[in-house]
Amino acid sequence: MNDLISDLRIPECRLNVAYDGKNYIVLHGDTPDYKVGEIICELDRTLGSFSEIVEQFKGCSYCLLPLKQENIVLAIDEIRKMLHSITGVASAEIIVSEIMIRVKEILLSDINNIDIDLSGLYKVSEDTINKVFCNTNYSSVGCSDIGHVFLSGLAMVHQMFISFREAFQATMERLEKTDDEKGAYIEHAVFENMRLIQAQNIECKIMYIEDKITNVFSIKDITSLLMFELANCINCNTIVKKCKNCGNYFPLYGRKDTVYCRFPSPNDKGKTCKEVGAQVTRVNKEKNELTTKEYRKIYMRLRMMCKRHPENEFASELLERLVSENRKYRLNLENNKISIDEYLKWLKGFEKN
């Protein structure tokens, strides 16, 4: 096995991005431009679906192929296409790059007969082993065939994914704060505590793209991408928000009162959260108009009854109960725990009185 592995040439993968100070052009096929901040926001939501990534890996056709040069190339191509189907191109490319770093490390460890370093950011917990290798022929990190080495690479980067999400979300929470507070915090947290300056793995080249000279950055791992994006967010004064539909962060461009992102909606991946949000807003408006109208009709009737007949204790108690119970029913309606019909049915109980 060692002789076979020693003949392998592991392709280097990386995320290649042209940056003009405002937008990114991802140089991997025909892809739309990314705004500053959108790549890490996209990556964060992708890594939140780690179980889906694992299942996609297990379903790839390369899994049982022997460790040969041509099979590694085929596997990378299939993994890349698979990731493109569940996330954006930028996230897919940086995930492939991170995994290939670990694949190379696994193969070199086997050649040199040394133990793989499974500590720190590349710690492989028992939970990760169970999650990644469940329903496979493998039980630990290794390289018995193509499927084994690539799933092992995925297992090794799982802790990196977790660390990235924790660092990203903690920083995004601060980015939502006031401008006076956010700048100093980010520069301290990102460039001192996380020591990303020393950890960066980024190359820059000058290239001629679309009739102009452009800086092209080759980013090799997730830590470097986090530093690259956050640095540009600081320089561009990027504002971030949490999407009201999917609950994930997105960089704000255009109207400051925007509450929905332009990423695919988890409820309907054929539409963006912005498109779904517009429908939800319209439905909620119609729902509120109808329910408010019916509620006000009963409320005013009971209130007039109390005003004309102050001695009527039953009417006073009924009005008080209507107001109190309405708060609970409206909350349940807003949280989709009850339907409009159920709310209106409850109101009719007061009409009968």
Image (spheres, grey):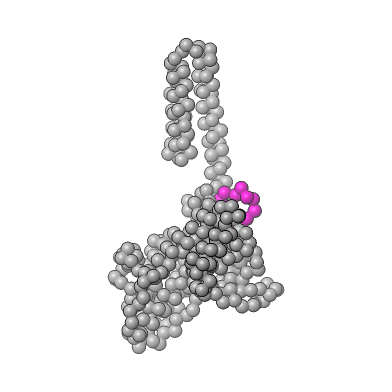
At which x and y percent is residue 67?
37, 80
The front one of 189 and 247 is: 189
Q: Quadrant of residue 16?
A: bottom right
Magenta stretch holds residue 261:
yes
Residue 288 drawn above or below residue 245:
above
Q: Residue at x 46, y 13 (%)?
A: 312
**Number of numbered callouts drawn:** 0
Span colored in magenta: 251-262
Q: Quadrant of the C terminus?
A: top left
Q: Quadrant of the N terminus?
A: bottom left
Q: Residue at x 57, y 55 (%)?
A: 181
Q: Residue furthest right?
A: 211
At which x and y percent is residue 341?
46, 32
Residue 183 drawn above or below residue 215:
above
Q: Residue at x 61, y 66 (%)?
A: 24
Q: Residue at x 51, y 67 (%)?
A: 192
At which x and y percent is residue 280?
53, 44
Magenta stretch holds residue 5:
no
**Can I make out residue 341 in this image?**
no
At which x and y percent is residue 172?
52, 57
